[in-house]
Image: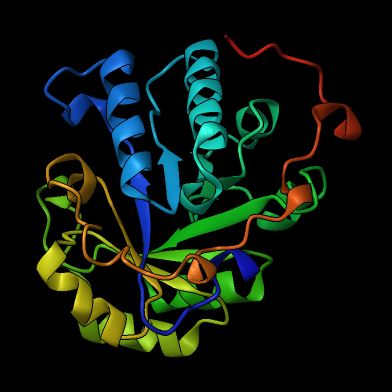
Amino acid sequence: MRFFRPNGVFPRFYYITDRRSLSNPNEASLLRHVRKVINWGVDFIQIREKDLPDRRLFDLTCRIVKMARETPRALRCRVIVNGRADIAVAAGADGVHLASSGIGTSAIRAWIPKNFIVGVSVHTMREIRAASAGDVDYILVGHVFPTASKEGMGAALGVDFLRRACLEASMPILALGGITVERIPAVMQAGAIGVAGISLFQKAENPMKNAKQRPADTRIPYPQDSHRTRSVFNIPSMKCPD
């Protein structure tokens, strides 16, 4: 929970990658964009490249983790991997993001590092209650607003649903889906601690430009022991690319 503690004023920004929606849909282009987003001051990056083979996903994750570690401490973001706790741990990432219908968090917590972040996506109040009963650090609620990427997947949940979700949940919530700079105040007023998205970061020019003008001590703490060595957890050593 400490990773997402509300600061009362400033939203948390959570970038979800999708190299296929970039003008040059390849890993090199994505890495260049990730570096730019890190320099903007994003708080979290979720690597969501489900079509990549394991080795390429591992290499990509290693490179993004290295970028995140090399940034100034005040700008340092956390790296989350979608659905692949094994690759996340092996590459030294900070956490994993799960689908609400996926493997339970208790099974994941049995072998991941102590301070590993676990998040989950939810779409209904029932899923929110289930997530609240589990051992997760945050919830992504979506899609809150209409978005082209979710066409054919039902109506947008809306701000009222988001407000009820924030009252119901026992952990922090970030709003996902159709988020624009203009919509950020509405989701913050509904009780979310931040916003997540793909196009918000890949099609907009620094959506954090004004929101990130905040004192250094309001940024998310980055505990020294949050990055454990792989050998502690008996995970086979894998060399990240230089």
- What residue sits 48% from the left and 87% below the top? 168
Residue 119: quarter of image: bottom right
- What residue sits 12% from the left and 50% below the top? 151
- What residue sits 79% from the left and 39% below the top? 228
Taking depth in this image into account, of 135 and 208 the one nearest to the observer is 208
Residue 48: quarter of image: top left
Tell me, what colour scheme is on the image? rainbow
Tell me the quarter of the image containing the N terminus.
bottom right
Q: Is residue 1 visible to us here?
A: no
> Looking at the picture, how far across and down is residue 162, in whole percent?
31, 80
Looking at the picture, does residue 122 appear above or below residue 125? above
Q: Is residue 84 left or right of residue 204?
A: right
Looking at the picture, does residue 174 appear above or below residue 121? below
Q: Is residue 143 visible to us here?
A: yes
Looking at the picture, does residue 207 appear above or below residue 211? above
- What residue sits 54% from the left and 70% below the top? 217
Q: Is residue 241 left or right of residue 147?
A: right
Q: Is residue 129 left or right of residue 38?
A: right
Taking depth in this image into account, of 167 and 12 the one nearest to the observer is 12
